[in-house]
Structure formats: C-alpha cells, structure tokens
Amino acid sequence: MNEVTFSFVGQTLHALGSGALWWPDQNLLCVSDLHLGKSERIARRGGPTLPPYDSKETLTRLSADIARTNPSTVICLGDSFDDLDASMAINAAEKRDITALQAGRRWIWIEGNHDPGPIELGGTHLFECTIGPLTFRHIAQAEAQAEISGHYHPKARLRTRGRSITRPAFLVDQARIILPAYGTYTGGMRSSDQVLYKLMGDRALAILTGPAPQTIPMPR
C-alpha cells in the first residue's frame, strides 16, 4: 500500500499517498482542504476559466480512500469548499456523491477560513473536535499539543539523482501534524516558509505524497 506508518503521541497513524490520514484504532479517515468548487469560484470572480472537473476528481479520490479504509468516521479539516457560495453551487451529481460517501458513517465538517462548513449537506459541523488524545482543527495553534490541522497546504522538495521533486507533504513533529491539501487545483506553501519554519520543531519530518510516499527531514 502506498503509505507511511508512523507513531504520534502514542498512536499509530498512516499517511496515505493521496494526502489522507488514516487512524486505524479509531477507524477514522481525515482529509484537509478539499476546496471543492475552486474552478467555479475562480470563474465567478472573473479569473481564468479552468476545466470544471476539480470537484469530481477530488471526490473520486476520496471515494477510493473511503473504499480502501472503510472508516466509521471521516473528518474534513476545513476549507472543504472554496467559499460558501461554492458549497451552494455544487451540482446534483456531486451532492449525490457526497451523500453516498456519508452514508453509514459519522461525518465531521471542521470550519475553515474559506467556508464556515457546508451547512446544507449532512454531517456534523464543528469549529474543532477532540477524539482520544488528538485534537482536530483547521489552523495550527502555536502552543497546541497532539494537534492535527491543515490550512497551509504544505509541500516539500526532495533532491535526488541530480534533480528535485516537489510534492504536497505531511509535516510531522512531536506536537502536531499538518496535512497537505487534498483538493485538485490547490497550490502549496513550501515547508521552508517562515510560517511553517516557526510552527514545526527542529526535528520535524516531511512525508511526501504520491504513488511512493517518502519521509525526509523537513526542508528548511
């Protein structure tokens, strides 16, 4: 399986190559920053017209991760839609897809800075939540412990064989995990950016996503 297994505050977690986080002991799947409706929002605000397939592609990958792990709980860590209007503009097929993914499981929408939670869809809508020893929120808090967050869309660069590869990445230290953006058309912040540099501890790791996830010291 394309994943990296690691220990965090006594819990065994799996960073999937897709960018999802799997917690088997709680049967919980966590994703962040889906940014559904991004192409629609860009066009609505007068930006360039992008192929309007980003939401479908993101939901297809999420469906595959759910089929693979069969979680009883799914947490979406905020910015699930690119803005509130995008959450109301999803088409009928995408709404059916989301409803089908929610069926038979607990679904938690965490409030993000782009959207207050898609209130027209099913599930529970929270600012943050704590399950076992872990707290899930959208934006990392500097003094927090045992925290899972998103928001920054971290990416990291791996140098190998005379070339470099940049991919979305999980950032992990003793206090927190910052998830990569799961959505299509989402950009990223380099792990060496001052904001992430200050948040993450000196021995932080980056887990690069993709077909063969790789763990490296977080580039600074």
Image: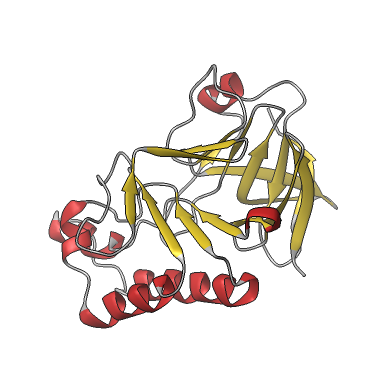
Q: Position of residue 70 (x, y in %)?
A: 59, 72
Q: What residue is rendered at 60% in x and 63% in y?
A: 18
Quadrant assignment for the C terminus: top right
Quadrant assignment for the N terminus: bottom right
Q: Quadrant of residue 87?
A: bottom left
Question: Could you tell whether 178 is left or right of 15 in the image?
Answer: left
- The colour scheme is secondary structure
Q: What residue is rendered at 70% in x and 33% in y?
A: 219
Along the viewing direction, whichever of 77 and 193 lies nearer the viewer: 77
Question: Could you tell whether 38 is left or right of 75 in the image?
Answer: left
Query: Can you name the residue that lies furthest to the right here?
Result: 161
Question: Could you tell whether 162 is left or right of 45 in the image?
Answer: right
Q: Number of numbered discs present?
A: 0
Q: What residue is rendered at 27% in x and 50% in y?
A: 117
Q: What residue is rendered at 47% in x and 51% in y?
A: 32
Q: Position of residue 212 (x, y in %)?
A: 76, 63
Along the viewing direction, whichever of 168 and 49 lies nearer the viewer: 168
Q: In which quarter of the image is residue 137?
A: top left
Query: Can you name the residue that lies furthest to the bottom here?
Result: 93
Q: Position of residue 95 (x, y in %)?
A: 27, 75
Question: Could you tell whether 43 is left or right of 73 in the image?
Answer: left
Along the viewing direction, whichever of 167 and 27 lies nearer the viewer: 27
Q: Where is residue 138 in the image (x, y as percent from the top left)?
A: 42, 39
Relative vertical location of residue 21 with respect to residue 152 in this rendering, above or below: below
Q: In which quarter of the image is residue 98?
A: bottom left
